Image: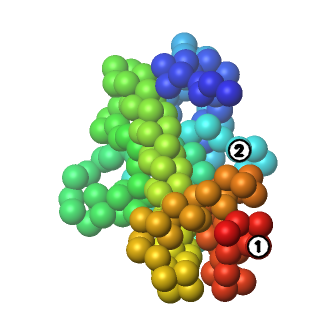
């Protein structure tokens, strides 16, 4: 499955929580031009769809309810900044925004903020998947090391020979080295078919 281009915005849905009506109308006009459906949102209201994006005015911060923060974490957030004080920026950073816009809004810059938000969200998601994959490999390496040590001790072999024996047994049993290593550590020995 190929991922949707960050530059393709038509058909996407966005939650929009903006206090100032002038800023809200600029966002509505730009969204219409770009083919994005913007849904006005008051932060206490329930949402009955999964948004592709959220625009949150910094005047609504801090988000006090954990459910609101968890909900916004599901899709990229664009923060609308009115002031650049350290305390306000700290509240905005708690949202982990994928992009931002400075108020008062202008139509210029909205498309770039949207594209950057979608692209950053995609890259972050890919990095999270890579981290999970690497963590799983690290865990499996510990199991392989334990199995190699067990085979070294039980067969009086050096490390390369013990690993080769495990690799050979894994091929014979049509299993990964990690799967066979887990069996070795659980049983305390190599499977019987391998000598």
x, y (%) of residue 128? 49, 53
Residue pushed farthest top?
33
Look at 56% across and 39% down and name the residue there: 53
From where the camera sits, is residue 126 visible? yes
Q: In front of the other: label 2 or label 1?
A: 1
- Rendered-image quadrant of the N terminus: top right
The image quarter containing residue 52 is top right
- Secondary structure type for disc 1: loop
Q: CA distance from mark 2 to mark 1?
A: 53 Å
Q: Nearer the viewer, residue 131 or 157?
A: 157
Q: Nearer the viewer, residue 194 or 177?
A: 194
Look at 48% across and 50% down and name the residue there: 130
Question: What's the image's color scheme?
Answer: rainbow
Task: Tell me if 163 is positioned left or right of 66 in this view.
Answer: left
x, y (%) of residue 18? 49, 44
- Residue 58 got which mark? none
Look at 21% across and 63% down and name the residue there: 86
- Residue 192 got which mark? 1
Chain-order first, disc 2 or disc 1:
2
Look at 37% across and 24% down and name the residue there: 112
Residues packed near mark 2 inside 10 Å, few (<14), some (14 to 19) or many (20 plus): few
Circle 2 is placed at which residue position? 50
The image quarter containing residue 88 is bottom left
- Secondary structure type for disc 2: loop
């Amino acid at each position: 499955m190929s991922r949707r281009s960050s530059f393709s915005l038509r058909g996407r849905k966005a939650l929009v929580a903006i206090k100032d009506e002038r800023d809200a109308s600029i966002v509505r006009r730009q969204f219409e031009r770009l083919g994005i459906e913007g849904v006005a949102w008051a932060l206490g209201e329930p949402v009955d769809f999964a948004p592709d994006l959220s625009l949150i005015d910094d005047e609504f911060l801090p988000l006090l309810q954990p459910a609101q923060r968890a909900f916004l974490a599901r899709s990229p957030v664009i923060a609308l900044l009115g002031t650049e004080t350290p305390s306000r920026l700290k509240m905005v950073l708690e949202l982990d925004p994928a992009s931002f816009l400075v108020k008062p809004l202008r139509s210029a810059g909205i498309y770039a903020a949207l594209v950057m938000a979608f692209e950053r969200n995609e890259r972050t998601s890919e990095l999270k998947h890579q981290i999970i994959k690497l963590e799983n490999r690290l865990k499996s390496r510990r199991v392989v090391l334990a199995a190699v040590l067990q085979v070294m001790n039980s067969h009086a072999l050096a490390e390369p020979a013990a690993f080769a024996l495990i690799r050979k047994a894994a091929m014979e049993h049509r299993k990964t080295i990690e799967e066979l290593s887990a069996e070795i550590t659980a049983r305390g020995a190599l499977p019987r078919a391998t000598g």
